[in-house]
């Protein structure tokens, strides 16, 4: 497990119902990943690092609005957590 922390921007706080995170693109909203907890200003998400995770994986963030809208973005896991890449590489040796 890797715990990430995040905060929502001031304009997003009243609009966001839930925040999910996972490694790899979710197939649908049911597989969006781990849900965040905490205040909008400091949320935490514990994401499982599976055996299939690779060093070139992307981390996906899914935000669900109170109006039902879904917004997704991704970024390389290496940018989000270099230490997790080190862990994955050492585990896969």
Image: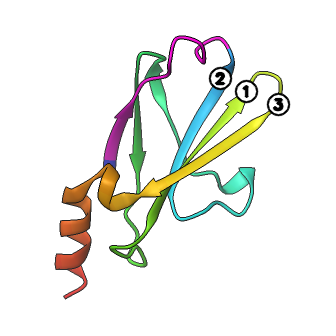
The residue at the point 69 percent across, 40 percent down is 71
The residue at the point 64 percent across, 46 percent down is 72
Place of residue 17 in the rendered image (x, y in percent of width and height, measured from the top left)? 67, 24
Answer whether labels 3 and 1 touch (C-beta < 8 Å): yes
The residue at the point 26 percent across, 72 percent down is 88
Q: In this view, does 82 lie to the left or right of 5?
A: left
Residue 19 visible in the picture: yes
Q: Which residue lies furthest to the right in this view?
A: 67
The residues tagged by marks 3 and 2 sit, at their Cα atoms, a distance apart of: 10 Å
| Residue that mark 1 sits on | 65
Answer whether labels 1 and 2 touch (C-beta < 8 Å): yes
Q: Is residue 26 magenta?
A: no
Query: Please, which colouring scheme is shown?
Result: rainbow
Residue 1 visible in the picture: no
Magenta stretch, residue numbers: 3-14
N-term mark: 3 or 2: 2
What secondary structure is found at the residue carrying circle 2? strand
Answer whether labels 3 and 2 touch (C-beta < 8 Å): no
Q: Quadrant of the N terminus?
A: bottom left
Residue 30 image label: none
Place of residue 84 in the rendered image (x, y in percent of width and height, measured from the top left)? 25, 60
| Residue that mark 2 sits on | 16
Q: Residue 28: which quarter of the image?
A: bottom right
Q: Which of 50 and 54 is in front in this view?
A: 54
Residue 68 image label: 3
Q: How crowded is mark 1: few (under 14 residues within 10 Å), some or many (20 or more)?
A: some
Q: Residue 66: which quarter of the image?
A: top right
Q: Is residue 6 magenta?
A: yes
Q: How crowded is mark 2: few (under 14 residues within 10 Å), some or many (20 or more)?
A: some
Q: In this view, does 28 lie to the left or right of 18?
A: right
Place of residue 93 in the rendered image (x, y in percent of width and height, measured from the top left)? 19, 88
């Amino acid at each position: 497990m890797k715990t990430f922390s995040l905060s929502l921007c001031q304009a997003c706080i009243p609009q966001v119902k839930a925040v999910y995170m996972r490694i790899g693109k979710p197939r649908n909203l049911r597989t969006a990943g781990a849900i965040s907890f905490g205040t909008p200003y400091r949320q935490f998400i514990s994401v499982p690092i599976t055996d299939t995770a690779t060093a070139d994986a992307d981390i996906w963030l899914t935000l669900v609005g109170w109006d039902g809208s879904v917004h997704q973005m991704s970024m390389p896991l290496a940018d989000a957590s270099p230490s997790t890449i080190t862990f994955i590489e050492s585990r896969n040796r």
